Amino acid sequence: MQLLGRTLPPLPQTAQQLLTSFERPDFSELSEKLVALEGQLPQPVTDVVQRGQDLLATEESRNVALAVGIPILTLFLLVSVASLLSSKPVKNSSDTVKSLERERAAIAEGLPTTFEPEAVTRYFQKRILFVAFRQFQLFLIAGGVAARIIYDYNVRSKEGAAEQAPKRAQELVEALTQLGPAFVKIGQALSIRPDFLPEPYPQYLAKLQDGVEPFDSAVAVAILEEELGARVEDVFGPRRDFDKPIASASLGQVYKTTYRTPSGEEVDVAVKVQRPGLLETCTRDLIVSRSILGLIAKIAGPESRVGRNCLSTIQVIDVYGARFIDELDYNREARSTSRLSDDLQSVEDLADVVKVPEVFRSTRHTLVTQWIDGVKITSVDVSDPAEKERVQTYISVLLNVYLAQLLDTGFLHSDPHPGNFLLLNDGRIGILDCGLMTEITREQQNAMIKYVSHLSSKQFGKTLEDLIALGFLDKELSENEENRKIVAPIIAEVLSQVSKGGGTAAFDRMDRTSLDGVGLGASGCSRAALGCAEA
């Protein structure tokens, strides 16, 4: 038997037995009964029955139906079983307690609380259906959007692609939101990188910074009470303070209430509660992303441009994943918040111009910090000259704050999207969300100073070693003299454009084909130099 010009393998014995059932008396009797009902059934149903009989009239057609139908049915059953085994949304306090218990059990069974790819892979190898279902879901939700974007930029005209871009950007936002917190965080990171994505994608992805749908407040209260071991009204203000969050994000949501400190003082606080079940699902999503990229690299070939880019992206996921999973531990964030506050207060010129909230208490899934009043920088009306000057002053101060972290304290706030900065009523800048922090070593600080020095003196050829020392480029690049000869001039060209005020447009003006054989791709080297220069 052939299908689409190809000879199909012999059918399994069970399938052959099923085929013979079409010739049995009971099947013929069923067929006769269906025909007898023809006058009693609606016409569309009768048509379907008749077409089914016609299609299965010959043995070859029945073989084809089985050859195609059995794999589809098997896939459907696997997906259905995986769906039943996958974690369900937490909807009430009872589910919340079970969710926390499941997470504790998963950790006891080997789920790492930090992102270690090998350990995480071992854990999920025992839960293959859980992973298979997510892979199928990822292709289902994101595959269509990705295909349409690729079609627009490779088949449509430049004008046609630009016309469709807002629609595709909105579809991308909706897909990332539907896929969950891990992909929302990726979208948030891309929203502040216009050098990676063309307009209007960063503008639309910025919606993910604050526009995430909150989860049920009853679930949040249940998490608080389970982890604090007391009723919320016994620890904080009235229970009604937790009826509705004042802000929601990809990992959790925030409530404003009051809290009595050990000294007896009653203060306004922000209570952050993490969405339930994130550790296992986010870890799974990172592993699924790695596996899909690995599969693409294997199909395309590890030495091909696509293969190299996929393997490079896996390395990025490994670094990003470690930082992202760290964010899920609010005890760690509490320690980081206190440390950043102490560090900035120790810098004489910054002690009176910046404010980091005080931490009162924390658990793995909850964090209680001082409430600070202010407005987001992005909400200020810069059409007013006075307000515009005010914002420019704040931005200058904020740049100094980050330079102090980079070159002095060595502990860097690494989530600088606009939602994490407030203009306070007393004139200071408030820094929020210390879940993502970076340690800057003394060697990296020295390399940064050298890099800035080489930029200022326009010694662009020397910046390659600086970028490698800073970790922007692979150390192996400096060990390959042929690659160095290709990359160094192009980095110099990018930085030369930036020094003339080219900004991210410098990258678009470059001839990037000369980097195809380097192993990093043009974007790996050029964007590293460009991003570091603009930082």
Image (cartoon, helix red, strand yellow):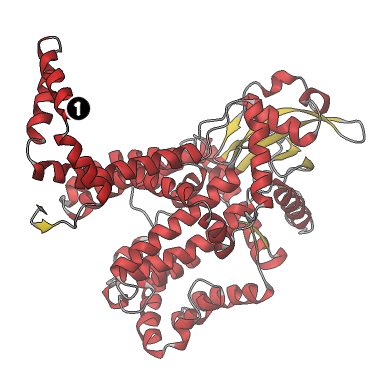
User: Taking 485 as reference, is 422 left or right?
Assistant: right
Name the side, left or right, on which 472 lies relative to 448. left
Q: Residue, x 14% and y 35% (percent of image)?
A: 23
Res. 535 visible in picture? no
- Density class for disc 1 (Cα within 10 Å; few <14, some 14-19, many ≥20) is few
Considering every residue shown, the one lying at the far right of the view is: 263
Against 243, residue 85 (above or below) is: below
Residue that lies at the very extreme toward the front in this rendered image: 25
Visible residue check, residue 142: yes
Q: Residue at x 79, y 58 (%)?
A: 346
**Residue 209 on image: x %, y %:** 51, 41
Q: Which residue is the extreme one toward the bottom?
A: 481
Residue toward you, 310 or 120: 120
Is 326 placed above or below 181 here? below
Residue at the spot of label 1: 26
Q: Is residue 508 above or below residue 521?
A: above
Q: Give x and y (percent) for residue 236.
A: 79, 27
- Relative depth, front residue between 43 and 199: 43
Give the percent coordinates (x, y) of residue 328: 63, 48
Please, what is the three-letter code of the amino acid marked with disc 1?
A: Asp
Disc 1, SS: helix
Which image quarter: residue 117?
A: bottom right
Total marks shown come to 1
Residue 2: image x %, image y %? 10, 54
Q: Nearer the viewer, residue 91 or 82?
A: 82
Q: Is residue 396 left or right of residue 41?
A: right
Identify the residue at horizontal 18%, vertical 23% (top origin): 30
Residue positioned 91% across, 31% down in the render: 264
